[in-house]
Image (cartoon, rainbow, N blue to C red):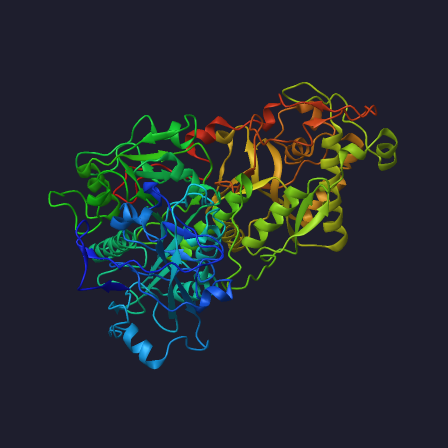
């Protein structure tokens, strides 16, 4: 809305001002105008309870006639039930704003389709560009259609009224409002991540009346557009402004090899969209704009506040991923490509913590529009002297450098997660698989992702993947582990059944005698020299009960998990492919490890024509494995309860790969046909030495000690991380030199 008057001008502003009017008594009506520069913008002034607002709480206030605003005021879709106010920046700091006896209050209401129209036909016509007649005071108002408002079925009604605003220190003081922030949502084929992305935005601890949404979606072959529309319809009214820019067609770019291929035209279109969002934020008077890719999930609901508190011109929250990838570069070449530095891994691994100056941030970052040099920042067109790769993240990094605007990344907190980008030849299914793995990683490392309840999601269809049963061994007193494990299986659409683990803490000598449990003569832990613990007895009995069920029910093949499993990427797909290959080769097998600690991997032989399988050698852990009916019968036939040792020591004896000949002499035959997935498909959630590490086998009392004392055996090397994994990467991800600026790691 703009207002102009021809008969009186303020010589200091060169704009029309309204003549003084008699004050009108009101019950309350103090308008506080903050001088804090961060509070400038369309949401800078806030009325106290009782100020005149058409949709406010006091009927007597609603009797006033509509008035016009000061010249230059533009109204956006602000909340109806909080009188939010808008003044031009030049008037906010003008002395008259502190001395005049009246202020102006405005409120807009967004209405969903089907609601009664708030404007007459004539009013609706003038709202789209016509002019209203002059009022009695000689003012002439022009109400312009705002291109940033959502298209129909959204309608807008407005009411402007006069409020007495004496400036007095004795009046109630309103706390300076938080900075106004624009959240930029740019979605393309993001159906798999949007529910969690939008859920994270909903949970940001920041007043929605201080937030605007700038949303665009384009070139989709999935349900992204409908999902965003559904979400905006549910929550859009809560935000100060909403801009919605959907494009239905085309669904792909010319010369595009696939939906993940970045052509020059795609780069340019993305840069143009980001520039539109940046321009909107400036015109709207925002203090900040947050760019966050739709596969970047801000699980820390304090992220926005924490970044603003830094007071930095461009700052990114360091995001975690499934690999060494993150949303910043520590070095950049003179040609604009990624350069490895000694600072990257200490920063990424949080071995050094704080906010650090870097040459580039991307994917998720906050820009201060009030910072010195911020007015020169742009995504498109690139800087006149720009010669680096035509890529939005590099173009913006150059713009910051050219404007003298510093860029920082902060890693003091865990802010959230980002999906590792797939290669240009891969498809949306590959990206979805990666994102599911990211959800699983968040379930382990926390905090977990939470999907929005305002969007419809495709239904999950869990199955047993061709196994007769999928068992999950879980202690009743570890509900957090059980919940995480079941959530992980649900995300992968695997139907698991919980098996109540035998709790070693409940065992005593009498119970173990009744079960026929006795210690293998001469057994000692290979590292600590300790004897068997009650936790290890409970673990063995838990696995043993599954073997008994397999044999009793005649189950052909089963999948067994413990509840401290960290799944590798595409666990389900890789396991299904492995079992198909084994079946195709008609390989006779009894047990296949999916997760273990290899002791001598160099001694393990590959299986001919099965590239993802090796003959298992001496191993620790029983995290995850596949067991056949024949294998279960062999394990039971050896009568292991009468000469018990830890289950992960027992299994290598049964396939004759244990190094201790004395132990092996107690068992015969040792003909278990054992193999292992290569690379492994599962690992422990934590290792000894990790802050979150907790073991019910290593932290337990000796098997024959009924005193109830708990002993920590954390010195056992079994539970330490294999240093070879740090060199190769547990998930098999390498770190090649990037062929493309987007493949920086």
Judged from this view, the residue extending furthest toward the front is 22
Do we see residue 340 in this rendering? yes
Of the 4 image quadrants, the one containing the C terminus is top left
- Expressed as whole percent of the image width and height from the top left, the position of residue 400 reads 22, 39
The quarter of the picture where the N terminus appears is bottom left
Q: Is residue 29 left or right of residue 356?
A: right
Q: Closest to the observer: 603 or 714? A: 714
Image spot of residue 594 (x, y percent):
56, 42
Is residue 570 found left or right of 367 in the rendered image? right
x, y percent for residue 295: 41, 51
Q: Nearer the viewer, residue 293 or 599?
A: 293
Above or below — where is 324 with respect to 611? Answer: above
Q: Quadrant of residue 223?
A: bottom left
Q: Residue furthest top?
A: 529
Residue closer to the observer: 708 or 703: 708
Please indicate, yes or no, whether residue 322 appears anywhere in the rendered image. Answer: no
Nearest the viewer among 191 and 209 is 209
Total tally of numbered discs in the picture: 0
Outermost residue, left direction? 385
Residue 186 on image: x %, y %: 34, 56
Residue 38 in which image quadrant: top left
């Amino acid at each position: 809305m703009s207002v102009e008057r021809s008969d009186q001008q303020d010589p200091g502003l060169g704009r029309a001002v309204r003549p003084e009017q008699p004050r009108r008594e009101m019950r309350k009506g103090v308008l506080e105008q903050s001088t804090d520069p961060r509070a400038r913008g369309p949401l800078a002034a806030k009325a106290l309870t009782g100020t005149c607002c058409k949709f406010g709480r006091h009927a007597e206030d609603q009797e006033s006639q509509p008035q016009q605003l000061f010249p230059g005021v533009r109204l956006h879709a602000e909340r109806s039930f909080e009188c939010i106010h808008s003044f031009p920046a030049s008037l906010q700091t003008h002395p008259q704003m502190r001395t005049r006896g009246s202020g102006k209050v405005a409120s807009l209401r967004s209405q969903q389709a089907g609601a009664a129209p708030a404007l007459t036909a004539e009013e609706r016509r003038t709202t789209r560009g016509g002019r209203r007649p002059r009022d009695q005071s000689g003012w002439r108002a022009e109400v312009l259609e705002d291109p940033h408002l959502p298209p129909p079925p959204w309608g807008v009604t407005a009411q402007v009224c006069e409020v007495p605003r004496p400036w007095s220190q004795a009046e109630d003081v309103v706390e300076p409002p938080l900075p106004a922030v624009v959240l930029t949502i740019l979605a393309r084929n993001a159906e798999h991540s949007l529910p969690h992305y939008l859920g994270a935005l909903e949970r940001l601890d920041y007043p929605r009346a201080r937030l605007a949404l700038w949303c665009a979606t384009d070139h989709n072959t999935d349900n992204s557009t409908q999902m965003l529309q559904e979400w905006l319809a549910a929550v859009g009214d809560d935000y100060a402004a909403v801009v919605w820019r959907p494009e239905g067609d085309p669904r792909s770019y010319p010369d595009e090899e696939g939906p993940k291929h970045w052509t020059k035209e795609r780069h340019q279109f993305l840069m143009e969209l980001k520039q539109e969002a940046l321009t909107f934020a400036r015109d709207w008077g925002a203090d900040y704009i947050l760019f966050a890719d739709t596969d970047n999930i801000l699980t820390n609901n304090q992220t926005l506040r924490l970044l603003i508190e830094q007071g930095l011109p461009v700052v990114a929250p360091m995001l975690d991923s499934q690999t060494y990838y993150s949303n910043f570069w520590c070095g950049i070449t003179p040609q604009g490509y990624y350069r490895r530095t000694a600072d990257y891994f200490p920063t990424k691994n949080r071995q050094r913590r704080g906010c650090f100056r870097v040459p580039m941030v991307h994917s998720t970052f906050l820009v201060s529009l009030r910072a010195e040099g911020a007015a020169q920042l742009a995504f498109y067109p690139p800087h006149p002297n720009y010669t680096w790769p035509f890529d939005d993240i590099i173009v913006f990094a150059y713009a910051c450098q050219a404007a003298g605007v510093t860029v920082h990344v902060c890693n003091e907190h865990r802010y959230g997660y980002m999906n590792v980008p797939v290669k240009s030849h891969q498809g949306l299914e590959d990206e979805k698989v990666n994102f599911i793995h990211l959800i699983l990683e968040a379930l382990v490392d926390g905090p977990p992702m939470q999907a929005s309840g305002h969007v419809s999601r495709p239904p999950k269809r869990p199955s047993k993947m061709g196994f007769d049963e999928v068992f999950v061994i879980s202690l009743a007193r570890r509900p957090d582990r059980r919940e995480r494990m079941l959530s992980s299986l649900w995300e992968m659409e695997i139907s698991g059944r919980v098996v109540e683990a035998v709790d070693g803490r409940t065992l005593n000598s009498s119970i173990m005698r009744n079960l026929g449990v006795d210690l293998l003569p001469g057994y000692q832990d290979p590292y600590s020299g300790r004897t068997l613990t009650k936790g290890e007895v409970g673990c063995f009995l838990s696995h043993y009960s599954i073997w008994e069920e397999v044999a009793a029910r005649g189950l052909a093949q089963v999948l067994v998990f413990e509840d401290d499993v960290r799944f590798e990427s595409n666990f389900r797909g890789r396991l299904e492919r492995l079992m198909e290959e084994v079946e195709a080769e008609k390989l006779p097998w009894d047990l296949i490890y999916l997760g273990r600690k290899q002791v001598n991997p160099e001694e393990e032989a590959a299986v001919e024509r099965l590239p993802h399988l090796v003959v298992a050698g001496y191993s620790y852990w029983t995290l995850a494995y596949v067991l056949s009916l024949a294998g279960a019968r062999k394990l039971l036939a050896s009568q292991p309860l009468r000469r018990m040792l830890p289950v992960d020591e027992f299994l290598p004896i049964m396939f004759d790969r244990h190094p201790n000949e004395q132990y092996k002499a107690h068992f015969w035959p040792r003909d278990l046909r054992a193999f292992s997935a290569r690379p492994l498909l599962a690992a422990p959630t934590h290792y000894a030495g990790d802050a979150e590490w907790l073991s019910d086998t290593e932290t337990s009392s000796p098997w024959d000690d009924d005193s109830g004392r708990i002993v920590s055996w954390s010195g056992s090397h079994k539970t330490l991380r294999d240093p070879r994994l740090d060199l190769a990467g547990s998930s098999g991800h390498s770190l090649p030199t990037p062929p493309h600026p987007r493949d920086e790691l």
